[in-house]
Image (cartoon, helix red, strand yellow):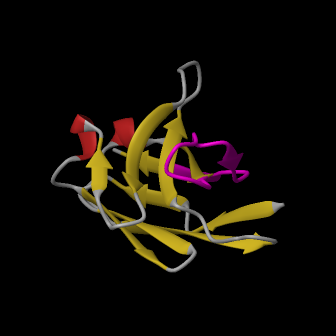
Amino acid sequence: QVYLVESGGGLVQAGETLRLSCAASGSSSTLYAMGWYRQAPGKQRELVATIAGRGSTDYADFVKGRFIISRDKNTVYLAMNSLKPEDTARYYCCGQQSPFGTYNIWGQGTQVTVSS
């Protein structure tokens, strides 16, 4: 079983920067793709960014130009720049084990709060 553990959330002011990290561990912990979703109170979970095995990335429109996803082996990072109050949410790390699978491995999440 693969486990994902996030870190790096916190409380910041609008315009500031945070960097989230997520480390995978456990048996067969090599994941094909990793990514980040977020969920704000009263809203559905939404995609933020993903990075696949060959380094290809995908971003939600609302973070393009502000957030950067990167990966080092089984750790994925999310650099969040120019944060806005609407970025306030719980951020979840996710993993996909094969190119033909889905994101079915999830961390517990880390809270990001951006004050205006």
Residue 83 visible in the shown view: no
Q: Does the magenta run of residues contain 70? A: no
Q: Which residue is outermost to the bottom?
A: 72
Q: Position of residue 66 (x, y in %)?
A: 21, 55
Q: Quadrant of residue 110?
A: bottom right
Quarter holding the N terminus is bottom right
The residue positioned 57% from the left and 39% from the top of the image is 102
Q: Position of residue 64 (x, y in %)?
A: 19, 48
Residue 7 visible in the shown view: yes
Q: Is 63 drawn above or below residue 57 in the view shown?
A: above
The residue positioned 54% from the left and 29% from the top of the image is 45
Q: Quadrant of residue 95?
A: bottom right
Predominant SS of the magenta segment: loop
Q: Which residues are magenta?
A: 96-112
Q: Is 38 drawn above or below residue 109 in the view shown?
A: above
The residue positioned 29% from the left and 56% from the top of the image is 57
Quarter holding the C terminus is top left
Closer to the camera, 33 or 84?
33
Q: Does the magenta run of residues contain 97? A: yes
Task: Count all numbered tags in the image, as a single digit.
Answer: 0
Q: Position of residue 104 (x, y in %)?
A: 67, 42
